[in-house]
Amino acid sequence: MKSLAELEAIRKATINRINLRTEDDSTTTRVVVGMATCGIAAGARPVMLAFMDEIAKRQLSNVTVSQTGCIGMCRLEPMVDVIVPGQDKVTYVHVKPEMVERIVDDHIIHGHPVHEFTIGANE
Amino acid sequence: MDNYRAHVLVCGGTGCSSSGSATLIERFHEKIAENHLEKEVKVVRTGCFGLCEAGPVVIIYPDGTFYSRVKPDDVEEIVTEHLLKGRKVEHLVYVDHATREQNAEKKLEDITFYKHQHRIALRNCGVIDPENIDEYLAMDGYKALEKALTQMTREEVIDEILKSGLRGRGGGGFPTGLKWKFTYQSQADQKYVACNADEGDPGAFMDRSILEGDPHAIIEAMAIAGYAIGASQGYIYVRAEYPIAVKRLSIAIEQARDYGLLGKNIFETGFDFDLNIRLGAGAFVCGEETALMHSIEGKRGEPTARPPFPAVKGLFDKPTMLNNVETYANVAQIILHGAEWFAAMGTEKSKGTKVFALGGKINNTGLVEIPMGTPLRTIIYDIGGGCPNGKKFKAVQTGGPSGGCLPESLLDTPVDYDNLIAAGSMMGSGGMIVMDEDNCMVDIARFYLDFIVDESCGKCAPCRIGTKRMKEILDRIVEGKGEEGDIEKLERLAETIKATALCGLGNTAPNPVLSTLRFFRDEYEAHIKEKRCPAHHCKSLLQYKIDPAKCRGCTACARVCPADAITGTVKNPHVIDPSKCLKCGSCMEKCRFGAISRE
């Protein structure tokens, strides 16, 4: 038998797991990882898993992680776009798993892009 | 890790299951494991998405990509391209019937089939995993029960349902709130709530889809109803032909008991309520409320005369409140969002939405939920996509064997209980079968009557004997042996049966004949007087002929004829022997010169 509080806790925990089926774009932050052959070869999969881990660890409910194909700058892979609603898209290049924590903390949670990792700082 | 980056939703409704969605799910698990994605991608078996025509349906979130008619061999491509590399598999994306667009970026709700719909009863179908109570809870599940038990009195619950204007979705359209009130007012030591899931109309499958896709919604609503009327026990009467629905319902009841949402002292409010499933053997008459209750009691499923109504004396002679599945599916939403929210939708006397099962000669076979008052034309053309192969629309049958056929001229009728009755049909449980120019209306009437003759329980003479006599007359008419006066005889029998049969099944049994007589009398007359079937459907009235001027003597027709009814020599006109002809139409299909005609 579950108490009302326990039911509410189940609701909250489950909605985090299923809201990517129902969410509207206007409030969702999207993390898009380049996962074409070039991206995967450069190590995009550990980067993507690191993002998923970090997002789960911090229990962020309105962030989705998805992949995209090659955008032509294979030498800069692994590349990650972070799109916070209402803000410009930020492209990170040469992303390594150890950089993920800062991107999630500074950019996704606090809204300050990590400029030294962006394409602008590296080109 | 509990968070997945992508969810693969595979339809597990009956439609998609029969087109192989179970194999798809297996294959997805296999391929996802092969590519080491099992910690990132989750596969969910959901209820019906509604667009059964495009099944098996697979939707991938967060992108919302809608794949249709997915075959097991396509799974590998979806996994390695879409799930691993993020490239959508364009050639499997659903093609919008109206715009002819195959747009992978398009969201589900932008697809023409879904654009006109408003989903309340079907809100969770195709969204959640019906076998996982947590997902139902996450969609505000059991919040309405909590609200009713902890914040509302029993009278307030009944009042809310009454004010919402909800009417019985099983067909009759009796105000649901009144039914609740009457049962509440009956005094007894024990009362019952029951759910009619004995969906028997040919072509109707909305109740099945709700039970398969969102079983907890019914359990929650029945518990609310139990609280309101003062019942501690409920029964769901579901037909054994719905194995997936029965299985998911059983799982859901177990889960609800586990969580203390069924059983003793729910939410520590002192309210006890439990549910049991009773399987029906599939008799149509058991959808009639008195017959249904006799069947639950273990007696023969035969109707008895009312009054006494079930609200006074129902199951085991105790006051019983019986509602249909779709009616219950609206209850929790009304309690949660309020009566005004619900009453703001629909027409003056029919509030909310209605689910229809679209079938027959229509492009998008499937399940649609629309606000009451939506014109038939919108349902059939905008949502349904019209008749396939460019054929001309002839009629739409609503209300199953108790309903009627409506012609083109009535297509702008806004759909609600009263408008459909005024038009000569009825809402019924929501089957909607579309017919095109190739359908013979006399034969359609005969089909429904045949169903009634089969399903009549035999207890009262008008239904047992009357419908049989009507069917004999129709049989004669389609065989070309119709006589002057047959139509009048049909009408007289119909009126007598309507006035004297014991239950709703019998009272409405002649409707398909009466409504086709009303709108398509000319077809009956053509059969009887001219021995001609205008739709070229009735075989006994058809004759295939070869035009000697057009026939080049290619022998194609003679070779394809299964009955060797066509004779002739090469380069000379051929002839059909009417005594041997089976009227299969193969020769006409085969002829390249248009020399063969039928009339």
Image (cartoon, rainbow, N blue to C red):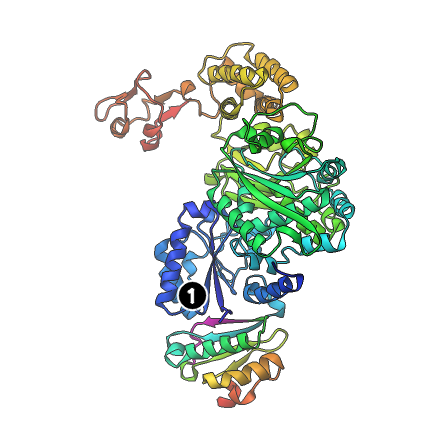
Observer-nearest of B11 and B155: B155
| Residue that label 1 marks | B82
Residue at (47% x, 17% y) in the render: B475
- Magenta segment: A64-73
The location of residue A113, given as percent across then percent down, is: 58, 84
Farthest-out residue, left: B570
How many neighbours does mark 1 have within 10 angstroms: few (below 14), some (14-19), or many (20 or more)? many
Q: Indicate the quadrant containing the C terminus of chain B: top left, top right, bottom left or bottom right.
A: top left
Q: Is residue B278 above or below residue B469?
A: below
Q: Circle 1 sits in a helix, a strand or a loop, which is it? A: helix
Query: Numbered disc 1: what chain?
Result: B
Q: Is residue B205 above or below residue B558?
A: below
Observer-nearest of B169 and A2: A2
The location of residue B591, given as percent across then percent down, is: 32, 31
- B478 left or right of B594 in image: right
- Dividing the picture into quadrants, the one containing residue B594 is top left
- B592 left or right of B297 in image: left
Q: Is residue A72 magenta?
A: yes
Residue at (62% x, 56% y) in the render: B141
Is residue B98 visible to us here? no
The location of residue A123, given as percent across then percent down, is: 48, 89
Farthest-out residue, top: B484
- Dividing the picture into quadrants, the one containing residue B543 is top left
- Dividing the picture into quadrants, the one containing residue B165 is top right
- B270 left or right of B514 in image: right
- Looking at numbered disc 1 in the image, what kind of residue is underneath it? His
Q: Is residue B296 magenta?
A: no
